[in-house]
Structure formats: structure tokens, C-alpha cells
Amino acid sequence: MLKLAICDDEPFMAEELSSLLSSYMEERGCTSWDICCFPDGKALLDSDGNFDLILLDIQMKGMDGMETARKLRQRGNQSILIFITVLKECVFDAFQVQAFDFLVKPLDPDRFRQILNRAIAWLEQREQRRMQKRTPSIMIQRGSAREIILLSKIRYCEVLGRKIYIHLAGGATVDYYGRLEELEQQVDPRFFRCHRSYLVNLDYVRGCDAGQVILTQQEKIPVSRLRERDFLQALLHHMKGRNTF
């Protein structure tokens, strides 16, 4: 679930931001999010502050948004900070607190969506990196949904037309629109591009014969003549690393 925060001492502005955020999340197809509103910087700091994204007014009574942001960063807070301001000149200090971007009052709905698009994309990429550190995986886009697939479960991938078909352990297949070149950049060294249309997980390879890669359960996929030598070298290196076959 995405945790979103709004910190603004003007109730009508907080309400407008909340409405824009909710509409944006619905349009994007998000199914789980929570919005918390705070009337000032102290109230935000008194909360756990563990938000994915914070919309923070710069000019507030008492502790202003910039000072609030400094205190958040001093605590090690890594939330995306988007400042709200009436004057563009006020955002120059934003670099000191690693602000993501800023919005100028009155709010421009188109700019709001553009900034949120980039912010949510950044959050998704950060989550993917976290998942990959815990358990190596990839994230694929299927329509409006995103799906995480463990690399250890992928036997091989093939491209047919504009679609990539990911063949999983157990026999299931997942397809999505994409390019094999891009997928190749996302996986780790256990994968080898044995053919222009195939990317194979060496963990599932049991040999190579007559231009065919032999997988577990004797399934076969092609290896191109120009890549066969490199494939065999990669397989031998992989076997030594695993110390098993």
C-alpha cells in the first residue's frame, strides 16, 4: 500500500491536494493507498513520518516546510518530497533536502499528473530494487497491473511478435508486451541469450546437442550457430560456480 501525506496549514488547499491525489490514484488503477493530512510541520514530525510521498507546503505558520524537510532528512527519512509554494524562488533551497520537485499555487492539474507520474514510477523502481536485493526478481507490466517474477522460477523466455513469453518452473507461462533486449538487461548472469528469440536460465540447462539447448525434462530450445561456443563456455563457467550439474 502506498502511504501518502499532505502537510499544509490551509484546509482548502489540503482538501484540493487530497482530491487530486485520490483522483490520480484511481485513474492510474492503484488499488491500495492511504492519505494522511497534517496542518503543520510539527504534526507531521510527531507522526512516524514513514510515508512514500509527502506533499509539503513551504510557507506555513510556525515551522515552515523547508525546516520540516530538514528535520525529516536528519532523521534519515527517505520519503519523496514535493514542495508546494506560491513563489518559484522559494524552491532553490530544496536541493539541500533532496526534494523531488515542486508545485506552484494555484495548482496546474496537468503538471500535478506529470510530477506524480515520475514520482510513482520512481517508487516502483525503488521497490523493484529492494525486491531484487532480497530475492532476485523482475517486474513486468501486464495491462494496468504489475507482476513480480522470481528469477529462480524462470526456465526460459522467448519472443514471438511483440510479446515475450516467460516459461516458469512447473509449466506455467506468463506473457507481456516487451523487448527481449530490455529483459536481458534486467536479469542476472545465470541467464544467457542463446538465440535472438530466446533467453535461457542456465540453472535449468542439462546440455547442448545439434543446435539445441536441452533443458530439464528433456525440453529443447534452439541455440544459434554463432552463439553456440559462447553458450557452452557460459554453461561451463556456470557449472563451476554452482559446483553441480
Image (cartoon, rainbow, N blue to C red):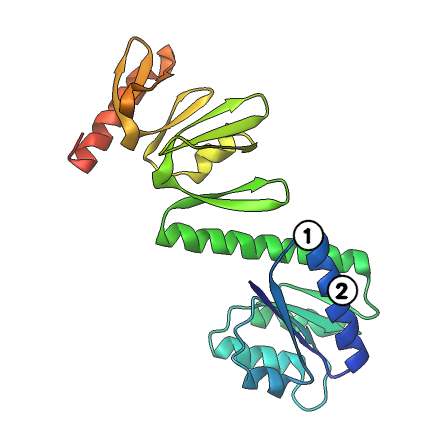
At label 2, the amino acid type is: Leu
**First of labels 1, 2 by sequence position:** 2
Q: Position of residue 36 (x, y in %)?
A: 64, 75
Q: Position of residue 97 (x, y in %)?
A: 57, 72
Distance (Cα) linking label 1 and label 2: 12 Å
Q: Quadrant of the N terminus?
A: bottom right
Residue at left 37%, top 13%? Answer: 226
Location of residue 185 (image quadrant): top left
Q: Quadrant of the C terminus?
A: top left
Residue ranking furthest to the bottom: 62
Q: Where 21 falls versus 60 (above or below)?
A: above
Circle number at residue 69: none
Q: Using a 10 Å C-alpha cutoff, classify the residue at mark 1 as few (fewer than 14 neighbours), some (14 to 19) or many (20 or more).
A: few
Instruction: Identify the residue position indicated by label 2 in the image.
Output: 20
Q: Using a 10 Å C-alpha cutoff, classify the residue at mark 2 as few (fewer than 14 neighbours), some (14 to 19) or many (20 or more).
A: some
Instruction: Identify the residue position indicated by label 1 in the image.
Output: 28
Q: Where 186 falls versus 224 (above or below)?
A: below
61 lies left or right of 245? right
At label 1, the amino acid type is: Arg
Residue ranking furthest to the left: 243
**Is label 2 in a helix, a strand or a loop?**
helix
Q: Position of residue 59 (x, y in %)?
A: 73, 81
**Is label 1 in a helix, a strand or a loop?**
helix
Nearest the viewer among 20 and 228 is 20
Q: Position of residue 131 (x, y in %)?
A: 42, 53
191 lies left or right of 69? left
Residue at left 36%, top 10%? Answer: 225
Location of residue 56 (image quadrant): bottom right
Residue ranking furthest to the top: 210
